[in-house]
Amino acid sequence: MALSRPAAPLAAAGVLGVAALLAFFVHPVLVPVLAGYVLFALHVVTPRVMGRSAVSALDSPVT
């Protein structure tokens, strides 16, 4: 995946870099909460960089 889309690892590194900067500034108790936001950000950024649209409830057909 990284060789076919070189922007994906760069985007992930950017998200992790911002998270590391925020972890330096927040209270140590809130670092685990920040980890949840980082996982969410990686799940949002990766499909956008890979050229796929994120699957949402609106995309599914109504049965």
Image: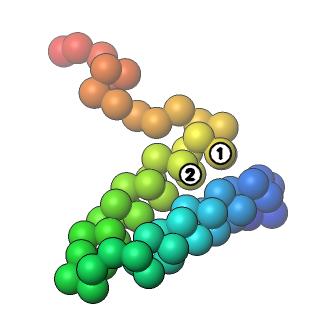
Query: Left of 41 or right of it: where is 18?
Result: right
Look at the numbered discs 2 and 1 and tell me whether their residues touch, using CB distance below 8 Å: yes
Q: Which mark is residue 46?
A: 2
Q: Name the spot of residue 8 as percent of width and height, x first.
A: 68, 57
| Residue picked out by circle 1 | 49
56 versus 10 height, above or below: above
Measured Cα–Cα span from mark 2 to mark 1: 5 Å
Query: Left of 21 or right of it: where is 8?
Result: right
How many residues crowd around disc 2 within 10 Å: few (fewer than 14), some, or many (20 or more)? some
Which residue type does callout 2 highlight?
Thr
Query: Left of 30 or right of it: where is 23?
Result: right
Q: Name the spot of residue 6 as percent of width and height, x first.
A: 79, 58
Q: Quadrant of the C terminus?
A: top left
47 versus 28 height, above or below: above
Q: Quadrant of residue 50?
A: top right
Would residue 16 be seen by someone viewing this image from the given angle?
no
Q: Secondary structure at mark 1?
A: helix
6 versus 58 height, above or below: below
Q: Name the spot of residue 52 as percent of width and height, x first.
A: 59, 36
Q: Secondary structure at mark 2?
A: helix
Q: Which mark is residue 13?
A: none
